[in-house]
Amino acid sequence: MQKRIISAVLSAAMLGTSVFSVPFVNAKTAVETGDIDASGIIDVSDLSELSLALLGDRNLSEDQKKAADVDGDGEVTLADLARIRQFISKKISRCVFCGITLTDIVDTSIRDNIATSDAMEEFYEDNVYIYEFGSIVSELIECTFSDGTVMNVRKALAEGMISISDLDKFNIRYSKREKKLNEFTAEVAEISENRMIVIPDSGFYYTDKVIVHCKQIISELSINAGDKVCIEYSGGIMESNPPQVVASRISILEKASDEVEYSFTPISVRVTVDHSIDEYPQHQMITDRAGFDALFTEKQELEIEESGGKLAKLNGKYTDEWFETHKLYVAYPGVGGPTSTRYKVEKVTNKEVTIYQNLLGQSMSPTEELADWIIFIEVSRDADVTDATEIKFNTVY
């Protein structure tokens, strides 16, 4: 059982780890916690050493046992193996790994009245900000830990022993300024768990693809393939194929559209006012011969002569065979005569049917508002045009 657990821990670490961690010298044992092979870094090699020891295939020296006992309980166990894996996989912080806590941060220049240079000192930076002290003082700000270890604030931040928020807790004064970030716009091509591949707009780094590392940002923004984004990054561009950047911020400029446009054939028929319609526009889907029969029976007597008997012609066209490959989106855009309101279908998508509506040159004839239009819009049966597809007017006044 123990052998299977060790194998699982080791396999997980090898798959999930690519960044090595600098070991921490334990003030009580004077050895580098976790650095079992004394290589100067904590990595999968240390896990391998400890795994072999736990299986009985490797004898550890006394110093190696001290380094392996990361939880400080005096024993080298599976718990130590698991903790090293968590640490190099960045699942736990350095302080948790070493089993210590921060007890104090003191500016000894103030405590001991030590004169310092008035020049601004940059002592830390993250993806967004550069942090500065008002004088050259980072070497004099001491961080003390529960095991007696003392290190200056610059080193403690660099090694992940403290965070900027710890300075606030202990009233250490500093200022911060936003980094000047580089940026480029691109379209998202592919997305994985912690990075995405984008196609940059022309003029960026002479490349057609860029890998962008941005795990947290992807989940926060719900970025999808096809989205147009602006990527802000600090630092340089990693030379690889394709090149890589680490994003500080990403903003979505335009979401990918899920609208699909379809080809269509419109046929307009003018009829006398249909009193069964009390509100415009309206529409209906006809997907079979029976549906058209019902419409033809209801509307044939309403057709105005100038339409040229179109309904009768359509009655002969829309057979059962025709409906096997087509369907009809029937639009009732509104009233109006040839010199008043005119309608022209411009576009058909799964979201909406766009109809050009011309309200220029309205006629004074009293009969102009005594007629309706029916527009039969023929589309492929496979087109995702349904009763939910709304009419949208593109109106000219």
Image (cartoon, rainbow, N blue to C red):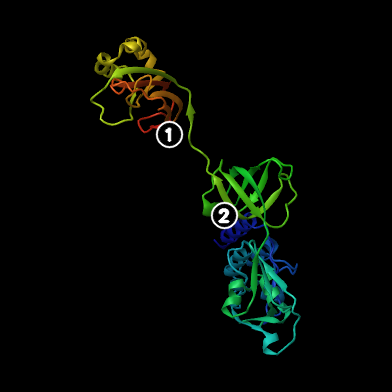
In the image: residue 276, left or right of residue 96:
left
Q: Residue at the spot x=65%, y=66% of the render?
A: 177
In the image: residue 391, left or right of residue 88:
left
The residue indicated by pointer 2 is 217
> Would you place residue 387 above or below residue 7 in this image?
above
Question: Disc 1 marks which amino acid?
Answer: Lys
Asked where in the image residue 301 lies, by quadrant, the reply is top left
Disc 1/disc 2 C-alpha distance (Å)? 30 Å
> Which one is earlier in the sequence, the residue at label 1 or at label 2?
2
Asked where in the image residue 124 lies, by quadrant, the reply is bottom right
Q: Is residue 33 visible?
A: no
State the quadrant of the N terminus: bottom right
Q: Position of residue 38 (x, y in %)?
A: 74, 69
Q: Position of residue 149 (x, y in %)?
A: 67, 81
The residue indicated by pointer 1 is 351
> Would you place residue 285 above or below residue 250 in this image?
above
State the quadrant of the C terminus: top left
